[in-house]
Each structure stands twice: as C-alpha cells, then as structure tokens.
C-alpha cells in the first residue's frame, strides 16, 4: 500500500469517528517516520495489516473493526490500550516481537464476560 493510500485511510478513520483528530495526527506523523530509508521493517515484508475486531458475543455483530497498516502497529497498540482495559495483562512487547518475527494470523482472542464482547487481533 502506498503512503498516500495509508494517509487517506487515516483521514477516513478520523472522518468516521473511529479515531480522534489527535490520534490521526500521531498516525500521520508515524507514516512520515516510516517513509524514510532508515525505517525498520517490522514483519520481514510479509504481513501488511494489523486487524482488531470487537464482536458482541450475544448478537454476533461487529462493534469495532479497525485495520491498521503494519508500519503503524506500535502507535495503534498504544491507542487501542485506552479502549480495551481488559487487555492490560497482555504483554504488548511479546506481540511486537511476534510481528517482527513474521507472525501471521490470529495473535490474540480475549473474551470479556462483563460486556459480552470478544476482542480478536490478527496480523495479515
């Protein structure tokens, strides 16, 4: 995905209310940082997307569906931590290491019985 397409996706996430303007600004700054020749490759060039899904367990309907370019995972995980306090026990560094090592598919599935939600995190 080109940098322009990623920028458009960030702007669309702001427009639809998935993220705030401040969060969007941080994502755009992170895109600028990854455009340079010294930007680290986080996945060995295979995975392109970090996907987060939150589903209502009773109805099966998707409540949150966020797709983040893999180059912005660290920024996205910091933002996501605010919205998913049930994930506080998960070692985010372990997830980052798995992504850097080329992991793909479902990394995490967490059920929140209090809110009847399921959180799933994928790398594709």
Image (cartoon, rainbow, N blue to C red):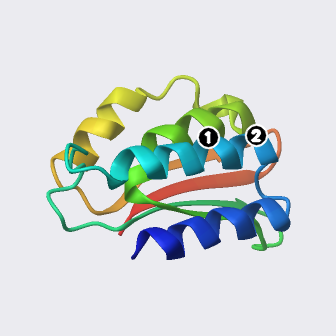
The answer to which image quadrant residue 106 occupies is bottom left
The answer to which image quadrant residue 114 occupies is top right
Rendered location of residue 116, percent (x, y): 79, 51
Circle 2 residue = 22
**Element at label 1:** helix
Circle 1 residue = 26
Rendered location of residue 99, percent (x, y): 27, 48
Q: Quadrant of the N terminus?
A: bottom left
Rendered location of residue 7, percent (x, y): 57, 65
Q: Pick whichever, 32 or 69, lies toward us.
A: 32
Q: Residue at x 40, y 75 (%)?
A: 2
The answer to which image quadrant residue 88 occupies is top right
Query: Against 3, is 23 above or below?
Result: above
Q: How many marks?
A: 2
10 Å crowding of disc 1: few (<14), some (14-19), many (20+): some
Q: Is residue 3 left or right of residue 9?
A: left
The Cα atoms of the two marked residues, 1 and 2, are separated by 6 Å
Query: Against 94, is 63 above or below?
Result: below
Query: Against 15, is 33 above or below?
Result: above
Circles 1 and 2 in contact, beta carbons < 8 Å: yes
Q: Say whether residue 106 is visible.
A: yes
Q: Residue at x 25, y 45 (%)?
A: 39
Q: Quadrant of the C terminus?
A: bottom left
């Amino acid at each position: 995905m080109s940098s322009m397409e990623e920028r458009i996706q960030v702007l669309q996430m702001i427009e639809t209310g998935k993220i705030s303007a401040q969060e969007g600004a941080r994502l755009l700054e992170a895109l600028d940082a990854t455009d340079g020749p010294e930007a680290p490759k986080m996945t060995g060039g295979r995975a392109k997307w970090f996907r987060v899904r939150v589903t209502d367990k009773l109805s099966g309907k998707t409540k949150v569906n966020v797709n983040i370019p893999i180059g912005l995972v660290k920024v996205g995980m910091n933002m996501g931590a605010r919205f998913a306090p049930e994930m506080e026990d998960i070692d985010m560094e372990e997830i980052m290491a798995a992504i850097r090592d080329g992991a793909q598919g479902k990394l995490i599935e967490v059920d929140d019985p209090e809110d009847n939600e399921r959180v799933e995190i994928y790398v594709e």
